[in-house]
Image (cartoon, rainbow, N blue to C red):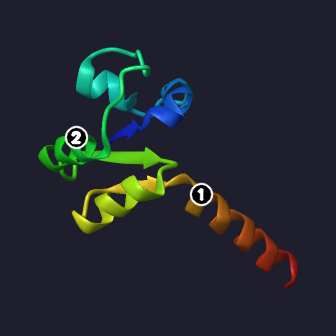
Amino acid sequence: MKYMTDAMLAGLAKELRKKGIDCETVHKLMRETEDSRIKIDDPDIVQFLRGKKDSITLITLDGQLAKYCKIDEIPHILVQDLVANHILERQLSSTR
C-alpha cells in the first residue's frame, strides 16, 4: 500500500519515507513537484484518489477531505482520530 499526505502534512511524508514507508505528498503525486504553494482543491484530490482506489491511502488533518473520502470509500487516515484514540487507549489502560 502506498500512502499520500495532504499539503498540511508534507513533512510527515519525508519522515515516513525515512522509516521505509512508501509515502509521497499530494503535490508530488498529482503535480510532480514538492511545491505546496500550488493549491490543490479537495475535489481534485478525491477525483485523483478515486482513480487509485485501494492502492493509495490518504493521510490528512483535513476533516472535510476525510469526509469526502469516507463517502467515496477511499482509504484514509484522519490524524486527529489516531491521536485521540491513542490518548483514550492510554487513559483506559492506566485506570485498570
- Check if mark 2's residue and mark 1's residue have beta carbons within 8 Å: no
Residue 33 image point, x, y percent? 33, 14
Residue at 77 percent across and 69 percent down: it is: 90
Q: Give the residue number, with chain letter if any, for mark 1.
A: 80
Judged by depth in the image, the label closer to the viewer, 2 or 1, is 2
The mark found on residue 44 in the picture is 2
Q: Residue furthest right?
A: 95
Is 11 drawn above or below residue 48 in the view shown? above
Identity, as a three-letter code, of the amino acid under mark 1: Gln
Identity, as a three-letter code, of the amino acid under mark 2: Asp
Residue 29 image point, x, y percent? 27, 27
Q: Residue furthest left?
A: 51
Few, some or many residues within 10 Å of mark 1 (<14, 14–19, 20+): few
Q: Nearer the N terminus, badge 2 or badge 1?
A: 2
Residue 35 image point, x, y percent? 41, 15
SS for callout 1:
helix
Quarter where residue 67 is shown: bottom left
Residue at 74 percent across and 65 percent down: it is: 87
Q: Is residue 53 left or right of residue 64?
A: left
Is 17 drawn above or below residue 35 in the view shown? below
25 or 16, which is in the foreground?
25
